[in-house]
Image (cartoon, rainbow, N blue to C red):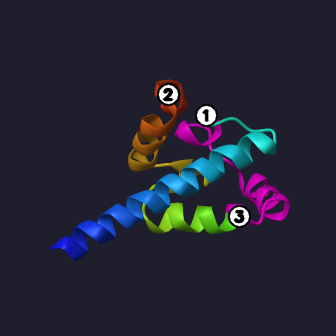
């Protein structure tokens, strides 16, 4: 049982690390957190390509977020955080970061 707790703890730390990196990279590249925390917004394929080219760490974090179900594509095919990802973002950066109004 301790192994399961350790694995869960590691996954959450990895997700939190990626969310912190993603937040920084978004700001560095002219985006805001609401770009991914609002299910109606999201990042387009072109914006994701630009982020990947400008910041190599983006691709790794994007993959971690998608694999762990903290991020997905919305109906328009844009990259957004899932409720799990928004909850973690809220825990890390406060209510405004995860507002989906």
Residue 2 location, quadrant: bottom left
Q: Is residue 44 above or below residue 3?
A: above
Q: Quadrant of the N terminus?
A: bottom left
Provide residue 22's location: percent of width, then percent of height.
64, 51
Q: Is residue 44 magenta?
A: yes
Residue shown at 49% from the left, 52% from the top: 16
Who is closer to the viewer here, 61 or 82?
Answer: 61
Which numbered marker is on residue 99?
2
Provide residue 81's location: percent of width, then percent of height.
51, 48
Which numbered marker is on residue 34?
1
Please indicate whether residue 61 sits to the left or right of residue 94 in the image.
right
Counting residues from the N terminus, which is met first, the one under dot 2 or under dot 1? 1
- Kindly state the secondary structure of the residue where label 2 is placed: loop
Residue shown at 69% from the left, 35% from the top: 32
- Asked whether the beta carbons under mark 2 and mark 1 sit within 8 Å of each other, the answer is yes
Sort mark 1 into few (<14), some (14-19) or many (20+) by Cα contacts within 10 Å: many
* Disc 1 versus disc 3: nearer the observer: 3
Residue shown at 69% from the left, 45% from the top: 24
The span picked out in magenta is 34-58
Which numbered marker is on residue 57?
3
């Amino acid at each position: 049982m301790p192994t399961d707790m350790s694995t869960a703890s590691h996954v959450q730390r990895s997700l939190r690390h990626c969310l912190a990196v993603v937040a920084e990279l978004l700001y560095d590249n002219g985006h805001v957190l609401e770009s991914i925390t609002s299910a109606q917004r999201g990042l387009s394929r072109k914006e994701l390509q630009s982020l990947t080219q400008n910041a190599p760490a983006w691709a790794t974090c994007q993959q971690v977020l998608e694999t762990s179900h903290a991020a997905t594509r919305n109906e328009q095919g844009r990259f957004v955080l899932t409720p799990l990802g928004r909850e973690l973002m809220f825990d890390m950066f406060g209510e405004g970061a995860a507002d989906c109004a």
